[in-house]
Amino acid sequence: MISPAELLVEIQRIHAAVQGYLPQDIVYQISYGLFRFFLGIMIIVSTIYILLTIYNACTRQRGKELPIEDSKAPFVTIQIPTYNERVAIRCAKKCLEFDYPKEKYEIIIGDDSSDAQVSDEIDAFAQAHGIKVTRRGSNAGFKSGNLNHMLQHSKGDIIVVFDSDFVPEKDFLRRIVAPFVHNPAVDAVQARWRFLNATRNTISLLGATIVAVFHQVVLPFMKRNGIAMLCGAAEAVRKDVLLQLGGWKHGSLTEDIEYSLRLLRRRRKILYLDTLECAGEVPHTAKDLYRQQMRWAYGVCHAFREHGKSIFLDRHISLREKFSIFVQASGYFFSVLLLLTFVFGTISFIFHAPGPIDIPKFFSELGINVLLSIGLLVAGVYSLHQMEYKGQIARMVAASLSYGIIVTYYVNKGICRVFLNKPMQWYMLHKEGNAAA
């Protein structure tokens, strides 16, 4: 393996090779200036995450839930979209155990499966328990297309959506519906996520940390500013409002974020219910984690490209709300900044004027820049602490500095596809619950 000193010598050799062919001083000045510029922005974003983490730690407060009487409970449709995932049966079983009035909710499994065996198992379970199954014959439009198809068969005033790997507790339905009953202005409710397999391996821990930062740092901050975002599972929406706004966007890879931005543009209220938790799985293989993060980056950036300008130019949306919305997407912005600082930092190093390399100075400056840019890592440490995974913090830091770098590459790949107007397919992830179901 090449040593750091040998690597620096090789870079210097490349510099010498291109000397005389390019206006190296100009290239150096431009690239170094851009490096410092993007590094500065990255440090600002990092600082914001550190301040948000401190703010949440110092002002931590959880809202109060109000109970509802059975007589006032609205009719609810529970939707479980699935594609070749028998784990949807496990989710449906948990939904059958809800302490909500049985005559006031229905369960629909939207089965887009191409695997006949999985569909047969779903049918057998559904027939035995009085559950409705809908099928389209394809998975056109991916999850959002499936949700829209189920919407046509849904009788509920409130729609509750679970990804197939989620396992809600017995009182989940009663608690997530309560805010709609007590406040007619609430149009959507998101519960906090926790994880079934966070500590399975290094990959699952990293995946859980990424999501945990959103649920333990970003969403609580947004909640204090009176807004929130949906996350795609363990969420509830008013059906009439959803229909009024045209349903889920067909083909969106993050239909939750896209619908959230539509609601926010229209001053509709989304509530983050941080007192209510629901567990689901996170990717446990590197390939699945990379694909998940690439898809999320693509979907979120696509949604912001469509709605971001209107939101940030809207005078009726406060600066605090706009800042909160920016924070929601800043993790992807940080990945772009990290890539740009690496690219321009490398170019400026290559085209630096020839001379002896001060290796101690190089690594000391590198270390300082890294320390100034660890805001997301600090937020991750805090999030694991809040979720009582204190013993996993060192392992998470190691994962962030290894697999996390590769995740950043795939995030940037997803973002680039948005701005190059290239489509992206929905990637199915391997769920451990499929083997156990």
Image (cartoon, rainbow, N blue to C red):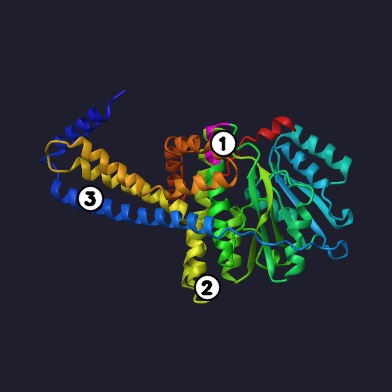
What amino acid type should be assigned to the residue bearing mark 3? Tyr
Q: Kindly report the secondary structure that dominates the magenta region of the rendered protein.
A: helix
Residue 63 is drawn in which quadrant? bottom right
- The correct choice, above or below, for 421 with respect to 357 in the image is below
Q: Position of residue 296 (x, y in %)?
A: 53, 48
The crowding category of the residue bearing disc 3, from other C-alpha atoms within 10 Å (few below 14, some 14 to 19, many at least 20), is many
Magenta span of residues: 201-207
Residue at label 3? 32
Q: Position of residue 425 (x, y in %)?
A: 55, 44
The crowding category of the residue bearing disc 1, from other C-alpha atoms within 10 Å (few below 14, some 14 to 19, many at least 20), is many
What amino acid type should be assigned to the residue bearing mark 1? Ser
Q: Secondary structure at mark 2?
A: loop
How far apart are the two marked residues, 1 and 2, measured between alpha carbons? Answer: 37 Å
Residue at label 1? 204
Left or right of 372: which side holds 433?
Answer: right
How far apart are the two marked residues, 3 and 2, measured between alpha carbons? Answer: 37 Å
